[in-house]
Amino acid sequence: MSTGGLGYLGPEGSFSHQAARRWLAISGCSFPLVPAGDLPALFASAERGKLEQIVCPLENSLEGSVALVLDLWLHESTLRQVGEVVLPVQQWLLVRPGVPMRSVSRVLSHPHALAQCRRTIASVLPGVPQVPASSTAEAARLVAQAPQERWAAVGSLEAARRWGLEPVLGPMEDGGANVTRFGILGWRSPARTGRDRTTLVVGSLEDRPGLLRDILDVLARRGLNLTRIESRPSREGLGRYLFLMDMEGHATDPGVADALASVRRLTGYLRLLGSYPCDPAWGGPASP
Ligand SMILES: O=C(O)C(=O)Cc1ccccc1
């Protein structure tokens, strides 16, 4: 039985925690927030019926998709996307108060955060070992509680406040707008709002030239705007992929419904992963 919680990748102070609070504000829901230790545990709690919805980082404007989330969703879960939150993010170098930056002996963070700051870290902390953590906030918590005081974390100013660390450098991502898009996954599909997005995954039993082109053609002929296409291994062998697609519109819009039926006929496998309202704060990808 669901406890009605909204699960997120914890601990407090993670970007997922910020996205979860923003989702409560957008949706008007009042679920209690429930932190999870890592992404597999987050999905497993939801699948066991312990959570009503979960917040997952899907993609980042500098570093791309979060492959682990896509793989858990596509291969180990029956959840549907019910919403999205688009969050501008900033990364800071966080140390225990008074620790000079030049003495840092190890830098911890989520691999996506380390990758967003690759050039800055190489220039200000050359040769310092980088250690992956399950989230930016977990990195901050570890630095705050480590026996070794010279560790640093990469994370938000909120994580610094929550875990009592001092921001000594930032924003430190390697240029460009840093924005992360989070998916809200659950079981109750929301009603059409008129400004919706639809996510689906297709795979093919047939391996023939032009199949992907034919699929994209179905969408283009109906004027459907694709906002993302991503491939992940289908786990059936080398060269076998699933294609995850986001497009504007709701599965009950006549053009989208018609396109889904045509794509289903073309492919061996189509799973509708959800239709949900677009984040009102996000204008969509920049036009060329
Ligand atoms: O590490 C965090 O703070 C998170 O919320 C997870 C995450 C992972 C990848 C991109 C953005 C956020």
Image: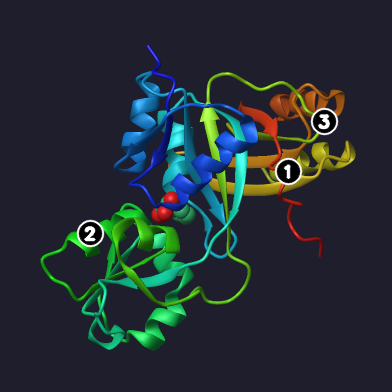
Characterize the local packing of mark 2: few (<14), some (14-19) or many (20 or more) Cα atoms within 10 angstroms.
Answer: some
Characterize the local packing of mark 1: few (<14), some (14-19) or many (20 or more) Cα atoms within 10 angstroms.
Answer: few
Does the beta carbon of the residue at mark 1 sit less than 8 Å from ligand 1?
no
Q: Residue at x 83, y 40 (%)?
A: 224
- Which residue in the structure is indicated by mark 3? 194
157 with respect to 281 (left or right): left
Identify which amino acid the numbered label 2 is placed on.
Leu
Name which of mark 3 and mark 1 comes first in the sequence. Answer: 3
Above or below, 254 relative to 65: above
How far apart are the alpha carbons under marks 3 and 1? Answer: 12 Å
What colouring method underlies this structural image?
rainbow
Name which of mark 2 and mark 1 comes first in the sequence. Answer: 2
How far apart are the alpha carbons under marks 2 and 3? Answer: 44 Å
- Which residue in the structure is indicated by mark 1? 280
Residue 215 image position (x, y, % from top left): 74, 39
Residue 142: assigned label: 2
Q: Residue at x 23, y 64 (%)?
A: 143
The foreground one among 117 and 15 is 15
Q: Residue at x 55, y 45 (%)?
A: 182
38 with respect to 33 (left or right): left
Q: Residue at x 35, y 53 (%)?
A: 135
Above or below, 57 relative to 205: below
